[in-house]
Amino acid sequence: MRRGSAAIILTIIILGFMMAISTSYVTMVQTETRFQTSQDKAARAQDAAFAGVGYVIARLLATSSTFLVDSTQASIKSKRLYFAYSRNAYDVTARFDDFDAAPTATFQNVASSQWLYPVSQGMLLADEMASSVAFLVTTYPAPDPTDTTPPYNVVPNYYYVKSQGMYRDIEPNGLVTATYSAQLLARLLIATPTFQVKLERYQPMEVEIDWNNAPFFLTPKFIYP
């Protein structure tokens, strides 16, 4: 009788142990799947940020004032295309204040920046909306490394891009359930002799947002060296 009871108890313990292992394995697999899904969506936000850099390169290549034979400070500031939050005088002044004592008088070829939604089969799955992926860009000149305080002189063949990418989980009814963001700081090389714009260097950076009237995303940052 005692042997039979011990055998039953041992069997119950073994079965319970096997069930615990099985439950732990299922939980581990589910956790890893969720983590991988989150990583994939964060990577898609970074892809959107790269799309923003590619958009700026395409716009510069399509703009005749990008490649300037006369690469004087006045010519670079007044003719080369830049992107800011808007084209109003206050925004342009705040955007390029570090590069000129009177930016509204010199930085004139400024396009307003807004969230753009790239139409690409490679960035969207079959059940996703076009607004799932978007990017926002802002650009500014490169300062002369010998300058230590603004207003900086502009290096003629360098051009900076901040690009913020976004990926959103959107339900069929339009409800956004999650947002993933990534931001890149890129330095472009403008080669006037060969009419090329190249991504010379880039680095991931913290995602900057505008809050409390502090436009962090619009503040210039640089890659050193």
Image (tube, helix red, strand yellow):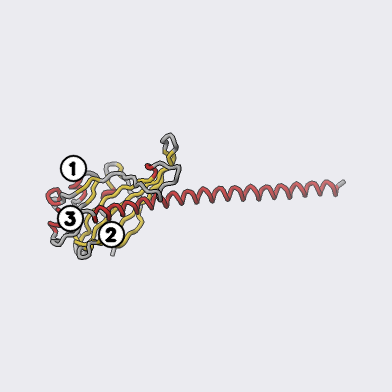
Provide residue 48's location: percent of width, then percent of height: 36, 50
Q: Amino acid at mark 1?
A: Asn
Q: Are the residues tagged 1 and 3 within 8 Å (C-beta)?
A: no
| Inter-mark Cα distance, 1 to 3 | 21 Å
| Category of crowding for the residue at label 2, using alpha-carbon neighbours closer than 10 angstroms: few (below 14), some (14–19), many (at least 20) | many
Q: Nearer the viewer, mark 1 or mark 3?
A: 3
- Label 3, secondary structure: give it: loop
What residue do we see at 54% from left, 51% from top? Answer: 32
| Category of crowding for the residue at label 3, using alpha-carbon neighbours closer than 10 angstroms: few (below 14), some (14–19), many (at least 20) | some
Question: Is 194 rendered above or below residue 90?
Answer: below
Name which of mark 2 and mark 1 comes first in the sequence.
1
Q: Nearer the viewer, mark 3 or mark 2?
A: 3
Q: Amino acid at mark 3?
A: Ser
Q: Is residue 107 left or right of residue 206?
A: left
Residue positioned most to the right: 1
Q: Which mark is residue 88?
A: 1
Name which of mark 1 and mark 3 comes first in the sequence.
3
Residue positioned most to the top: 173
71 vs 206, nearest the viewer: 71
Provide residue 113's location: percent of width, then percent of height: 26, 46
| Inter-mark Cα distance, 3 to 2 | 18 Å
Quadrant in which the C terminus appears? bottom left
Provide residue 88's location: percent of width, then percent of height: 18, 42
Q: Amino acid at mark 2?
A: Arg
Q: Is residue 5 left or right of residue 74?
A: right
- Label 1, secondary structure: give it: loop
Q: Which mark is residue 65?
A: 3
Provide residue 97's location: percent of width, then percent of height: 18, 51
Residue tagged by mark 2?
187
- Label 2, secondary structure: give it: strand
